[in-house]
């Protein structure tokens, strides 16, 4: 990214962005874009609910209520599946941190990261302060956030050498949603984008992957920075132009805005694990089913994949973050359990002797051909050797869940039911599903959904 570029006024790309944002119309958007946005909201809510079990989520919720409280005359929002109140940025922080810490949300492969994990928490917070918000308008806001955040991600990754966390750019998507919903002027909008980009966490992703903690993908701070930027810009605070939008070397990344819908080019993770491990998981699950492999008969497992995937942990985890940034552990779970779900990344699983044994038997190797295809594709092959000497090879497998082919509605709904059902009753899951799946109807009220989620409390 250009270090310094003096701008006399807004670049045409900012004017184009603002005109596009305020001209979005639910009735004019392609049907598949609206439908995809609705399914992404459903998926994110399921992950957010399941993530309530994580220690990171509990800490973030308690912290937000205590330290990010709203002042007497400030807008406030309730925390999803909790009901307690914090400021808008505080609520976004708590919900985004919780959601980000269960690595099962949507993403766009060129960004090497995720937007929805910040966008939905920010929207839930913003909606509480809105006088009204229809379901269709809420979907338009999510679409606007996706389209902006991912282009900012492409501009950042395409112009700087470091691999930054998603919080570095999904904060801008939160600004865009808030700017349209709150009806701010172009001047406030432009300053808010600049403030958000300047203060968003441009943290180094690989440092967290090498040492997994509750920081995860930076989204816990990306979402509140986006909302803070908008609120403080409304108060008159100024910020330098957003380089990922207005600087010359970013211009090309915005040329297809409104023409190519990145919202529909995302994947939806079937497993709560770093995306880089998904192809090995799929390969292992395929081998287990195809050859009726009993995990107790496994003598060795070899994973051949791209470098980032091979760099994931090969050790037995002792925390949920370490389990989610592991390669050997989820592959072991695939062979032993036949599933890699929420339970498999919870501390209760880490003492399982068979999972420990299989983790130690797994090795990772970089395949130059698969490395050459990254990040456009996430691929791997798995070779398993049994104690009787038989060997099976999965061949090259591409991670499931999209973007090509896109996951079906049935697959996303089934995942939602699994994840939400890990903490909610069947009746609650069905009620939440009905509310989300009707968001694109003409009479849908998003604020009613926000109320439902806030009052649908999950026991600690």
Image: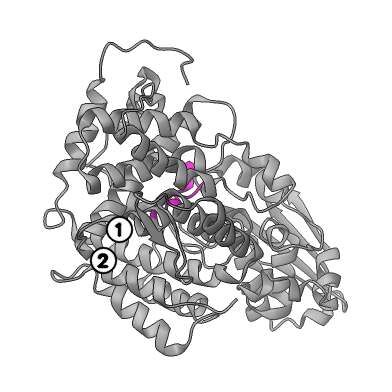
Reply above or below: 197 against 118.
above
Q: Residue at x 51, y 50 (%)?
A: 68
- Look at the image and tell me whether residue 28 can be seen: yes
Secondary structure beneath disc 2?
helix
Real-space Cα separation, disc 1 to disc 2, in angstroms: 8 Å
**Of callouts 1 and 2, the N-terminal one:** 1
Instruction: Give whichever of 6, 38 is nearer the camera.
Output: 6
Q: Residue at x 56, y 45 (%)?
A: 218
Reply above or below: 236 against 315.
above
Reply above or below: 233 against 43.
above
Asked if the residue at tag 2 contacts the one at tag 1, i.e. Cβ–Cβ closer than 8 Å, the answer is yes
Q: Residue furthest front?
A: 72
How many residues crowd mark 2 within 10 Å: few (<14), some (14–19), many (20+)?
Answer: many
Q: Quadrant of residue 320?
A: bottom right
Q: Residue at x 31, y 32 (%)?
A: 254
Residue extent of the magenta highlight: 107-119
- Look at the image and tell me whether residue 33 can be seen: no
- On residue 446, which mark appears? 2
Q: Can you identify the residue that label 1 sits on? A: 127
Q: Residue at x 38, y 56 (%)?
A: 76
Viewer-side label of 1, 2: 1
- On residue 356, which mark appears? none
- Does the magenta-highlighted stretch encompass residue 114? yes
Residue 414 percent coordinates (x, y): 44, 78
Secondary structure beneath disc 1?
helix
Instruction: Give whichever of 214, 294 is nearer the camera.
Output: 214
Seen in the image, is 396 located left or right of residue 34? right
Seen in the image, is 79 located left or right of residue 440? right
Residue 390 percent coordinates (x, y): 81, 75
Residue 173 percent coordinates (x, y): 37, 43
């Amino acid at each position: 990214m250009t270090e310094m570029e003096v701008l006399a006024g807004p670049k045409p790309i900012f004017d184009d962005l603002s005109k596009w944002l305020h001209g979005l119309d639910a009735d004019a958007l392609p049907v598949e874009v609206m439908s995809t946005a609705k399914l992404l909201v459903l998926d994110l809510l399921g992950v957010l609910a399941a993530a309530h079990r994580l220690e990171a989520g509990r800490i973030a919720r308690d912290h937000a209520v205590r330290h990010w409280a709203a002042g007497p005359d400030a807008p406030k929002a309730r925390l999803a599946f909790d009901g307690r109140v914090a400021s808008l940025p505080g609520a976004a922080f708590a919900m985004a941190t919780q959601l980000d810490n269960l690595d099962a949300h949507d993403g766009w492969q060129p960004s090497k990261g995720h937007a929805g994990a910040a966008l939905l928490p920010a929207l839930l917070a913003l909606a509480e302060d809105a006088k009204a918000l229809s379901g269709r308008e809420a979907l338009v806001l999510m679409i606007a956030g996706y389209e902006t955040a991912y282009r900012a991600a492409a501009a950042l990754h395409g112009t700087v050498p470091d691999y930054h966390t998603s919080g570095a750019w999904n904060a801008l998507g939160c600004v865009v949603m808030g700017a349209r919903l709150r009806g701010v002027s172009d001047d406030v909008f432009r300053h808010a984008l600049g403030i958000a980009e300047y203060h968003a966490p441009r943290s180094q992703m690989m440092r967290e992957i090498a040492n997994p903690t509750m920081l995860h993908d930076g989204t816990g701070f990306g979402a509140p920075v986006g909302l803070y930027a908008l609120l403080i810009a409304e108060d008159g605070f100024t910020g330098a132009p957003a380089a990922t939008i207005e600087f010359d070397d970013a211009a090309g990344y915005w040329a297809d805005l409104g023409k190519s819908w990145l919202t529909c080019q995302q994947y939806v993770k079937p497993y709560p694990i770093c995306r880089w491990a998904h192809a090995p998981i799929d390969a292992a699950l395929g081998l287990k089913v195809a050859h009726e492999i009993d995990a107790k008969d496994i003598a060795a497992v070899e994973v051949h994949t791209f470098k980032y995937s091979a760099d994931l942990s090969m050790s037995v985890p002792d925390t949920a973050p370490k389990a989610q940034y592991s390669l050997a552990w989820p592959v072991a779970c695939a062979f032993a359990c036949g599933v890699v779900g929420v339970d498999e990344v919870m501390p209760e699983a880490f003492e399982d002797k068979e999972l420990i044994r299989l983790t130690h038997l797994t090795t990772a190797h970089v395949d130059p051909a698969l490395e050459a295809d990254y990040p456009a594709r996430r691929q791997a092959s798995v070779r398993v050797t049994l104690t009787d000497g038989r060997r099976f090879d999965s061949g090259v497998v591409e991670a499931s869940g999209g973007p090509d082919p896109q996951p079906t509605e049935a697959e996303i709904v089934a995942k939602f039911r699994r994840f939400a059902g890990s903490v909610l009753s069947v009746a609650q899951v069905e009620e939440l599903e009905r509310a989300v799946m009707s968001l694109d109807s003409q009479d849908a009220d998003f604020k009613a959904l926000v109320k439902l989620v806030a009052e649908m409390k999950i026991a600690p």
